[in-house]
Structure formats: C-alpha cells, structure tokens
Image (cartoon, helix red, strand yellow):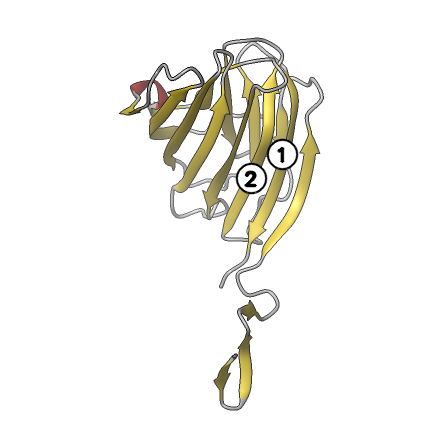
Amino acid sequence: MGIISNGTTILDNGAFSVGLGSMVLLSEQTASGASSVEFTSGIDSTYPIYRIDVINAHGSANDKNFQINFSSDGGSNYNVTKTTTGFVAEHGEDGNPSGSLFYNTFLDLAQSTGNQTLGYNGGTDSGDSTSGTIYLFNPSSTTFVKHFISHTNIRDYTNDCRTLFVAGYLNTTSAVDAVRFTFISSNVDDGIFKLYGIQDS
C-alpha cells in the first residue's frame, strides 16, 4: 500500500517516485592491458555522491597492489593530498591464515599525494581478482574536504580471501573531477569499472 499525502500517492508498494535517490550509470570501462583505468569526465556538481564499482580487476603480474588516486585538474595530475586509514579481514583457502581481523598501517596515508592501496597481493590467474565499491562524497565542493569510503575483496595470488575497508579524506578545497585505478608496476589486464551518480533524496 502506498503512502498517501493530501490524496496523492508518493510511495507505491515500495517504489520511489522517479529520481528520488536514484543511482544513474554515467560511464563504464573494460580494462584490456592498459597501464590504468581513468574516469576523467562525469564527476562534477551534478551529483552529491559518486559511486564506482570495480568488478574482477586483476593485473599483469603477481603480488601487485591495486590502487586509486584522484585529480583536481581533469586527470592531468593524480596527486590530491590524502589522509586515510584502513583495516583488513582475511582467511586462506587452505585455512591458513585461519581467519583474522586487523588494523593495517600499510593502508594509512598521512597528508600524502601518493596512490592509495585498496587491495594487495593480487595475482594473474583467472580466479585472482579484486572487486569492490568506492564512494566519493561531494567532490565538487570548494568549501569542504572530500571524504571517500572503499570496501574491496580480493582473491590473491596465494589463494587467500582478503577484504579491505579503507576510508579517508582528500585534503583540498579544490573540486575533485577525475579518478584513476592502477596496479603497482603492472598493467590492468582485466576488469569492469562503472561510475554512478547518486541523486539527492
């Protein structure tokens, strides 16, 4: 049953009215051995929240880290200053490690312009890949810093399952308008990358 306000149905059997909190696909890329995957358009003042889905990304060499960085000049430079932190849960296919949850200082950046690690020990086998979601909040603001939250899961080259929770802020009041994904010293051999805008509710 819908919610009725002044005789008008504003919610019909759980379906919101058009545009209310909608997630809009803006761009999709499939990696094919390039050195990076970049979104250099579509991130602007249109939406207050942007979401990027990473689906089965893997690099061209074993034991490489999957990383992200941000740009405030349309992708000419990926060097936005970041302060970040993260924690990890992991479990091996063979039971070793038997399961652990820990804070990993390796994921921390302190006022760094370098790449942010979202996954590590990636592999090249068909089963080795990283998938996850990154949220970027109000990137067009020229008043506030920009927060981001990432949750990724990786099946690494040693057959461990590892999930990483990484978050932080981009310490700039310039608008952030581009995002780049890379593997350290490795091409992005495969993976689907989708950029969404999330509308105001």
Q: Is residue 73 above or below residue 11?
A: above
Kindly give the residue lying farthest to the bottom in the view shown. 7
**Left or right of residue 121: residue 167:** left
| Residues tagged 1 and 2 counted as in contact (Cβ below 8 A) | yes
Q: Which residue is mark 2?
A: 52
Determine the residue positioned at 57% across, 33% down: 54
Give how far across and how far down residue 179 sits, in percent.
56, 33
Instruction: Give the mark nearer the N terminus: 1 vs 2.
Output: 2
Give how far across and how far down residue 106 sits, in percent.
34, 18
Q: Amino acid at mark 1?
A: Phe
Q: Residues within 10 Å of mark 1 (few under 14, many from 20)?
A: many
Determine the residue positioned at 69% across, 33% down: 29
Q: Nearer the viewer, residue 168 or 22?
A: 22
Q: For numbered disc 1, what is the local secondary structure?
A: strand
Q: Is residue 62 above or below residue 154?
A: above
Q: Residue 175, labelled with which disc? A: none
Give how far across and how far down residue 22 sits, in percent.
57, 59
**Left or right of residue 69: residue 163:** left
Q: For numbered disc 2, what is the local secondary structure?
A: strand
| Viewer can see residue 120 | yes
Q: Residues within 10 Å of mark 2 (few under 14, many from 20)?
A: many
Q: Amino acid at mark 2?
A: Ile
Q: Residue 193, labelled with which disc? A: 1
Q: Is residue 125 above or below residue 175?
A: above
Kindly give the residue lying farthest to the front in the view shown. 94
What's the CA distance linking mark 1 and mark 2?
A: 7 Å
